[in-house]
Amino acid sequence: MKEDISIAKAIAIVLERNPHLRQEGIAHDVLQWYLCRMEGWFATDADAISLQCWDQEVLLPGGHGLMVRGYRPVINTLAKGLDIRLGHRVVEIVRHWNRVEVTVSNGKTFVADAAVITVPLGVLKSNTIKFEPRLPEWKEEAIRELSVGVENKIVLHFSEVFWPNVEFLGVVSSTTYGCSYFLNLHKATGHAVLVYMPAGRLACDIEKMSDEAAAQFAFSQLKKILPNAAEPLNYLVSHWGSDENTLGSYTFDGVGKPRDLYEKLRIPVDNLFFAGEATSV
């Protein structure tokens, strides 16, 4: 593959070669906000996104949808009639030619004809699940080389709506790090809720805060455009980057990484099958 560079570097090169395209003032800040939205889409910073691959993903047909009652109704429907064991942390997967043995942290072992592995890529990367025998080198390479990013949600619940009836609110800044994106859930759900969605380094930095401090930070961003905003009644904060059950939000196309890594992660190994967002282009 010919030398790849990041989206951030590509933009810097274009502006260096074409000084007349350089933006100043509010125009510059708005450009940073669009880059910030791109960082949210990939869950990482623009200096980590591949120029060669950023636009290669296959989009599903249809528009965007919002689960007004959350994902639980979907999960409950899919779960009907299934034997689901909660609180069973898998620590080892042993494959034989005719069976798979899955051991969980309390020492119990389950035996099956095959296993479908859908743990997040971050968990596979952490090596907290031991594979016996080891996965082949091409599979280990896919796990190692695929990039996983972080995007979090800070949900702010207010006593009343004080913002315009739009789908989202944006806060522009001179850097992508300083920009903000708030999803307006009132428009779809009727509840006075805004969701602040930081990504990349900003999301990782916010994860180091307490939930209260994270919610206050999100609220301080909102006050930049709505100075008379009322304090939130309560809040919810996700920690996808540090939660031991996820260790990241979703994959992105890293600089210099081949596109076939997703397919390599998807291909089965004997009676072990792999699924999840990181196996799909």
Image: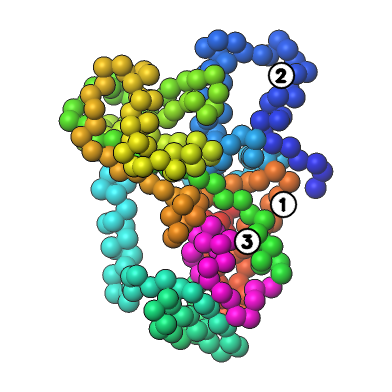
N-term mark: 2 or 1: 2
Circle 1 SS class: loop
Which residue shows up at 55% across the image and 23% down it? 175
Residue 154: % across, % down = 35, 39
Residue 64 shows in this picture: no
Which residue carries the number 2 mark? 15
Mark 1 is on which residue type? Pro
Colour convention of the picture: rainbow
N-term mark: 1 or 3: 3
- In this picture, residue 187 sits left or right of residue 103: left
Numbered marks: total: 3
Q: Nearer the viewer, residue 260 or 217?
A: 217
Which residue carries the number 1 mark? 258
Which residue carries the number 3 mark? 143
- In this picture, residue 271 sits left or right of residue 237: right
The span from disc 1 to disc 3 (Cα, nearest Å) is 13 Å
Which residue shows up at 50% across the image and 45% down it? 150
Mark 3 is on which residue type? Ile
- In this picture, residue 204 sits left or right of residue 266: left
Queried whether the magenta region covers residue 122, the answer comes back as: yes
Circle 2 SS class: helix
Q: In the current view of this chain or complex, which residue is farthest to the left?
A: 159
Circle 3 SS class: helix
Residue 59: % across, % down = 54, 45
Task: Check disc 2: other Cα within 10 Å, few if <14, some if 14-19, many if 20+.
Answer: some
Which residue shows up at 36% across the image and 42% down it? 210
